[in-house]
Image (spheres, grey):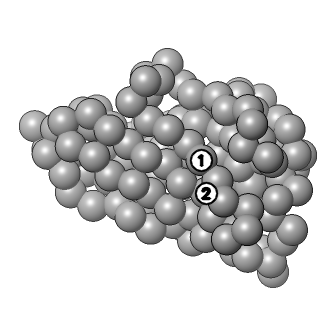
Amino acid sequence: QVQLVESGGGLVQAGGSLRLSCAASGRTFSMYAMGWFRQAPGKERDLVATINWSGGSTYYADSVKGRFTISRDNAKNMVYLQMNSLKPEDTAVYYCASDRTRWCIGPGCTYDYWGQGTQVTVSS
């Protein structure tokens, strides 16, 4: 049974930082690309960042480019999202997800497993 469990969310002031973590189990984690998504109240879920199986290729949405960094540690079955210079518009529930392939990054990938989400709230 595949499980993805996010942690690290919370309340932070604008300009602050948070580091989200996603712990994966039940799958050969290193074989799959991973992604972070977010969903704000009343809005659709948006792609934030993705990373291929090795960590050698990444993709970022324009809205977070230069502020967020996705990384992974395959030995620990973990994927991370370092979020710096946070803005109130970054407020959302953040989800990690596992892609069906090793290499797909960016929009259009197919994610078949999702975590339960962690809330990030950025105050102005």
Name the residue at 71% across, 49% down.
Answer: 34
Image coords of residue 42 (percent x, y): 38, 40
Image coords of residue 50 (percent x, y): 65, 39
Name the residue at 73% across, 68% down.
Answer: 75
Q: Quadrant of the C terminus?
A: top left
83 w.r.t. 26: above or below: above
* Mark 1 residue type: Ser
Could you tell whether 110 is left or right of 5 in the image?
Answer: right
84 w.r.t. 21: above or below: above
Name the residue at 32% across, 38% down.
Answer: 84
Name the residue at 89% across, 46% down.
Answer: 101
- 44 or 106, which is in the foreground? 106
Q: Secondary structure at mark 1?
A: strand
Q: Which residue is mark 2?
A: 79
Q: Secondary structure at mark 2?
A: strand
Q: Is the C-beta separation of discs 1 and 2 under 8 Å?
A: yes
Which residue lies most toward the top here? 62
Q: Which residue is mark 1?
A: 71
